[in-house]
Image (cartoon, helix red, strand yellow):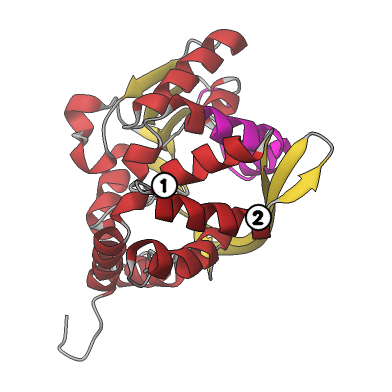
Amino acid sequence: MTAHMVDYNEVWSDHMKRNREVNSARDCSRIWESRDNALRFWNIFQENRDRVEKTIAGTYFTPESRVLDIGAGPGTLAIPFAQRVAHVTVVEPAEGMLSVLREKMAEEGVDNIAIVQKRWEDVNVNEDLEPPYDVVIASFSLGMQDIEAAIEKMTEAGNGRIYLYHFAGETPWDRDCKDLWPRLYGKEYRPGPKSDILYNVLYQMGIYPHVRTFRLQHAQRFATEEEAMQHFCHQYGVTTAEQEAIVREHLAQVLQAESAGLVLPGSSTRVKIWWEIE
């Protein structure tokens, strides 16, 4: 790479590093170790079943296909895929997420999902997986420091198409954390890298993908204010009474009352990026 060119993999890595250094309280692996948080995540997606169905419908597969779902969470995509294809392998490190996944697999009578409890960075394709996969998908789970290496490993595991879903622009939680972090921790919040950097990483890898941008409406619901407090204090790593008071004040401003309790509505811009492995 010539001296004047920007190395976008380094740009991605720098964004990830700064995000983790400043925002260690929002470490995803810690948040999703909680089964309650994982179940809430599952329930949010059940209210957005049309979005799940659009994701499935926007993926090319056949009944004989084998799918690799990276950062599968509680199975919001893995279970619907498993009901339509021959096999699904999920890679997911958080026990809370896997607890809900196993429960929902039993409820749905799904038995064609293999589980790999690891971070994608720690997966060995030949030892941990059963390649090749016709579909490799990572839906809002691209928290890897070295995204180029992560994509190379996806290519190694697949022989069909790769689908990546990520964020564009400022998300609602970015806005909330931008407001809260100086008051909670006395430092500036640093968001993670977005789809613009991801596209440029792919471009420098010689991958020229399809790109589609869309808006997504979403909502988190809570029966009581205390339930909301418990959820967000855990997410924000709150440890003191002073921090708790700051979060309570914030929630009083953003939560909306509804018949069944409280709701935090949100809207964000998402990007679907996909290409065929050559």
Q: CA distance from mark 2 to mark 1?
A: 30 Å
Q: Which residue is depicted at the point 68% across and 37% down?
A: 53
Asked if the stretch drawn in magenta spans residue 92, the answer is no
What element does badge 1 sit on? loop
Q: Position of residue 156 (x, y in %)?
A: 26, 43
Q: Which mark is residue 185?
A: none
Give the residue type at disc 1: Ser
Give the residue type at disc 2: Ala
Q: Which residue corresponds to mark 2?
A: 252
Q: Position of residue 242 (x, y in %)?
A: 41, 55
Q: Which residue is depicted at the point 62% across and 43% down?
A: 55
Most frequent secondary structure within the magenta stretch: helix
Q: Nearer the viewer, residue 215 or 208?
A: 215
Tell me if I can see residue 25 in this picture: yes
Q: Which residues are magenta?
A: 39-64
Picture layout, residue 101 above or below residue 174: above
Picture layout, residue 18 above or below residue 259: below
